[in-house]
Image: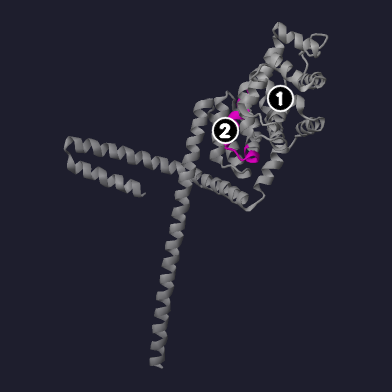
Amino acid sequence: VNKQLGIIDNKTKATAAKLAAVSTAAATAVAGAAAAVVGYSVKVGASFEKAMSEVQAISGASGESLENLTEKAKEMGRTTAFSASEAAEAMKYMAMAGWKEQDIISGISGVMNLAAASGESLGSVSDIVTDAMTAFKMSSEQAEHFADVLAATSSSANTNVEMLGMSFKQSAALAGTMGYSIEDVSLALGLMANAGIKGETAGMAIKNSIANMASPTKSMAAVMDQLNLSLTDSNGNMKDFRTVLTEVRKGFSGLSKDEQAAAAATLFGKEAMAGMLSIVGASDADFNKLADAIDNSSGSAKKMADVMLDNLSGQFTMLKSVTEGIGISIYDKFKRPLTDALKSVTKNFEGLAKSLESGALSGGLDTLAKTISDALV
């Protein structure tokens, strides 16, 4: 019996030792995982905090306003293809354009949907939207509509958001001054793009054509009279740009190809004539198809963004954004004690430097010990 009890006792000790080893390994793994989570949280959280500080510095937001912007950026990180830090970057560009707290909060969803739909960088799209909307005198509440128009244009014509942005740099200021809409200018740019005229070239064509028709020379005025063209109606009111385009198409349709080229060169100028002739040469079916797509563009950016994410790669992107959001939430719990600890460490290192400079080695070592202790905590 004693022998059997001894065997059992040895087995129990062996089992206990194995369990202890397993427990130690498990504890080590958990500790490592916890350290990794905290390390990741500090990294993404500090990066997000820095990005929001840039937004604060540019926009002047503080207190409740900054908190509202911060919460909106976090929301965008949870619900879109972009992270909270990327949302903060978009906010920075909006602030640079002079947008304030409520403008940014109202407009950021449209910007992010357009960026996701186009596959282009959030910062670049934000810059395009804010600049062009300012030129067209559109309010921040219209950002989603603006994004929908650009999404519909880029998906229905041979162009993309980046090239449309390049076109707007040349044409938006004058078009906006004339009171022309983003829909009508996008229609013209889309028709030009279908003929291979894109980017700044298309924008210059629109700008020069409008400028020439607004203040024509004698030879230009003669062509306008011949083709019954004008920018104003009989009462002196400005016509919308689509009406102008329709009348240009109608007026040029009665000319031969050679006559069209000559009239376009005189009226629009040699640099702009190719772009305007591409609008003249577009079929009625193509003109109406693109116009219908733009006029019925509501929700286009969001729909395109959803399609872009409806795949494995898109879901990994969403997972990354959600993961960063979790990291930021964890960081929010740690940042105060971490900040206080770093301040203490910095203060002690300053004391160490002074002690070493004065030759008080003993005091310096005491300070170093305190510094290490604070760092470990």
Q: Amino acid at mark 2?
A: Ser
Residue 254 % position (x, y): 83, 20
Residue situated in front as seen by the camera: 199 or 44: 199
Q: Is the residue under label 2 in contact with that under label 1 (CB below 8 Å)?
A: no
Give the image's coloring scheme. one colour
Residue situated in front as seen by the camera: 331 or 99: 99
Q: Give the magenta range.
A: 115-134
Q: Amino acid at mark 1?
A: Val
Q: Residue at x 76, y 24 (%)?
A: 280
Q: Is residue 129 magenta?
A: yes
| Label 2 neighbour load within 10 Å: few <14, some 14-19, many 20+ | some
Q: What residue does disc 1 label?
A: 185
Helix, strand or loop for disc 1: helix
Residue 87 % position (x, y): 57, 37
Q: Quadrant of residue 11?
A: bottom left
Q: Quadrant of residue 265?
A: top right
Residue 312 % position (x, y): 62, 53
Q: Residue at x 57, y 46 (%)?
A: 321
Residue 179 % position (x, y): 72, 17
Q: Residue at x 48, y 40 (%)?
A: 47
Q: What residue does disc 2 label?
A: 124
Q: Viewed as shown, does residue 232 lie left or right of 126?
A: right
Residue situated in front as seen by the camera: 213 or 60: 213
**Which residue is outermost to the top?**
218
Residue 218, compared with residue 242, is above or below; it is above
Chain-order first, disc 1 or disc 2: 2
Magenta: main secondary structure? helix
